[in-house]
Amino acid sequence: MKLKTLVGSGDRIMLLTSPFLIVGLTLNILFPSLFSVSGPPMMLRAISIVVLIPGVTIWIWSVVLLLTRIPKGELITYGPYSLVKHPLYAGVAFLVLPWLGFLFNTWLGVLIGFVLYVASRLFSPEEEKTLSQAFGSTWDEYCHKIVIPWL
């Protein structure tokens, strides 16, 4: 199995996201008051923990499926992949980074999550084209069954 098959668009997504992460973290360290969410307040902390639990679960589940099914040449159509085409990217962008950021008293996670999502949308079509070529009608059927196809 080629590493590129396992990584998909992840390398390009991270390459685009990394400068925002590096600059954001540097600015957050130098000027923490600009990024502060005031504490975080107890309610925001509680919501963050509640959202992080499924977020981290989806992230880990997606990684395990990728690591165990891609080497076998399988198209993953169940679990978090039945909800969205790219649960790894979407889960980290919406359910992990923003809420982890809030727990660390910064809204930087929201910004990095947004950049990660935009990067995934830029590079996912090429990955999806490759999947379509590899799996043909099975891919087409999968795309019609996804619960949230636009995410």
Image (tube, rainbow, N blue to C red):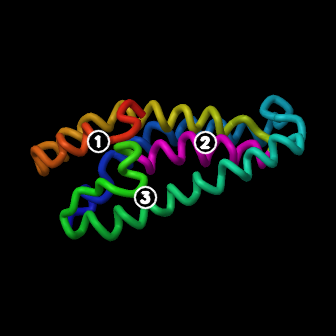
Determine the main secondary structure of the stretch shown in magenta: helix
| The quadrant where residue 110 appears | top right
Q: In the image, 134: left or right of 34?
A: left
Q: Read off the residue under disc 2.
A: 22
Identity of the residue drawn at 23% across and 56% down: 75
Q: Position of residue 26 (x, y in %)?
A: 70, 40
Q: Which residue is denoted by mark 3 in the rendering?
A: 62
SS class of the residue under badge 3?
helix
Q: Nearer the viewer, mark 3 or mark 1?
A: 1
User: At label 2, which amino acid type do we have?
Assistant: Ile
CB-based contact (under 8 Å), mark 2 and mark 1: no
Please name the residue shown 62% across and 32% down the image: 111
Q: Are marks 3 and 2 in contact (CB under 8 Å)?
A: no
The amino acid type, in three-letter code, at marker 3 is: Ser
The disc placed on residue 108 is none
- Residue beneath label 1, please? 145
Q: For the point 59% across and 45% down, which residue is it?
A: 95
x, y percent for residue 91:
51, 47
Is label 2 in a helix, a strand or a loop? helix
Mark 1 surroundings within 10 Å by alpha-carbon count, few (fewer than 14), some (14 through 19), many (20 or more): few
Was residue 122 drawn as part of the magenta stretch in this picture? no
- Which of pointers 3 and 1 lies earlier in the amino acid sequence? 3
Magenta stretch, residue numbers: 87-104
Q: CA distance from mark 2 to mark 1?
A: 38 Å
**Mark 3 nearby-residue class (10 Å; few <14, some 14–19, many ≥20):** many
